[in-house]
Image (cartoon, grey):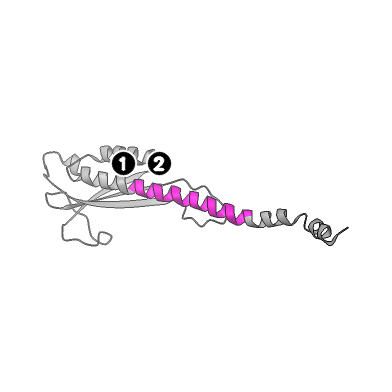
């Protein structure tokens, strides 16, 4: 028996051990990319729905219609049924909407629409994830305010 044959026989299970050690890291990377791709796709969908909602809110669409249209925009993207859409009006001079007090609608004011929902969390181990909470906002200027129909311009 040659030395070459004995060396090959001693390493019989080495490939299986190496595969077992590397497959964990490889699969964590693959599933992590899938999870974050779903999250970023959902965030982009929420941003699109918020922009569309702000555009529609600036011309006086009702809260129910805003929720329905925004829900349609993101429902196709694996969302949970807990979709919330808020609409608030601010003075055009406000720059920090988190601390400002919202007011009533009027021509020239700013409308802020926030779309929030929870996307799919695949719950893979070893992948840090915030639970899939997505929240995006958009801003538009109110045009042609009509005070004859206040329900269209209510905050929601």
| Dominant secondary-structure state across the stretch colored magenta | helix
Q: Which residue is mark 1?
A: 70
Q: Going by the image, does 30 lie left or right of 24?
A: left
Residue 31 position within the rendered picture, expressed as x and y whole percent measured from the top left: 53, 50
- Asked whether residue 156 is in view, the answer is no
Figure label count: 2
Label 1 Cα neighbours within 10 Å, binned few <14 / some 14-19 / many ≥20? many
Query: Residue 120's x, y, as percent?
Result: 46, 45
Residue beneath the point at 11% across and 39% down: 148
Residue at x 62% of width, y 55% of height: 24
Residues drawn in magenta:
23-46
Q: Quadrant of the N terminus?
A: bottom right
Q: Secondary structure at mark 2?
A: loop
Q: State which mark lies toward you, 2 or 1.
A: 2
For this orientation, the residue located farthest to the right is 1
In the rendered structure, find residue 51 and report the number of the disc placed on it. Answer: none
Find out whether residue 28 is within the magenta segment: yes
Image check: 29 left or right of 18? left
> In this view of the protein, can residue 3 be seen by the observer?
yes
Of mark 2 and mark 1, the one earlier in the sequence is 1
Q: What SS does tag 1 mark?
A: helix
Q: Residue at x 39, y 38 (%)?
A: 76
The quarter of the picture where residue 13 lies is bottom right
Q: CA distance from mark 2 to mark 1?
A: 12 Å
Q: Neighbour class for label 2 at 10 Å: few (<14), some, many (≥20)?
A: some
Let me know if residue 145 is in the magenta part.
no
Q: Quadrant of residue 21?
A: bottom right
Residue placed under numbered mark 2 in the picture? 77
């Amino acid at each position: 028996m040659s030395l070459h044959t004995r060396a090959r026989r001693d390493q019989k299970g080495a490939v299986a051990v190496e595969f077992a050690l590397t497959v964990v890291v490889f699969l964590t990377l693959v599933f992590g990319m899938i999870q974050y791709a779903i999250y970023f796709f959902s965030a982009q969908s929420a941003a699109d729905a918020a922009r569309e909602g702000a555009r529609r809110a600036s011309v006086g669409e009702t809260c129910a219609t805003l929720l329905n249209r925004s829900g349609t925009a993101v429902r196709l993207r694996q969302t949970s049924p807990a979709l919330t859409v808020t609409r608030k009006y601010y003075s055009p001079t406000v720059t920090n909407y988190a601390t400002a007090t919202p007011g009533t609608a009027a021509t020239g004011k700013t409308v802020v629409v926030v779309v929030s929902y929870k996307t799919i969390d695949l719950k893979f181990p070893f992948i840090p994830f915030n639970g899939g909470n997505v929240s995006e906002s958009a801003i538009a200027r109110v045009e042609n305010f009509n005070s004859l129909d206040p329900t269209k311009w209510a905050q929601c």
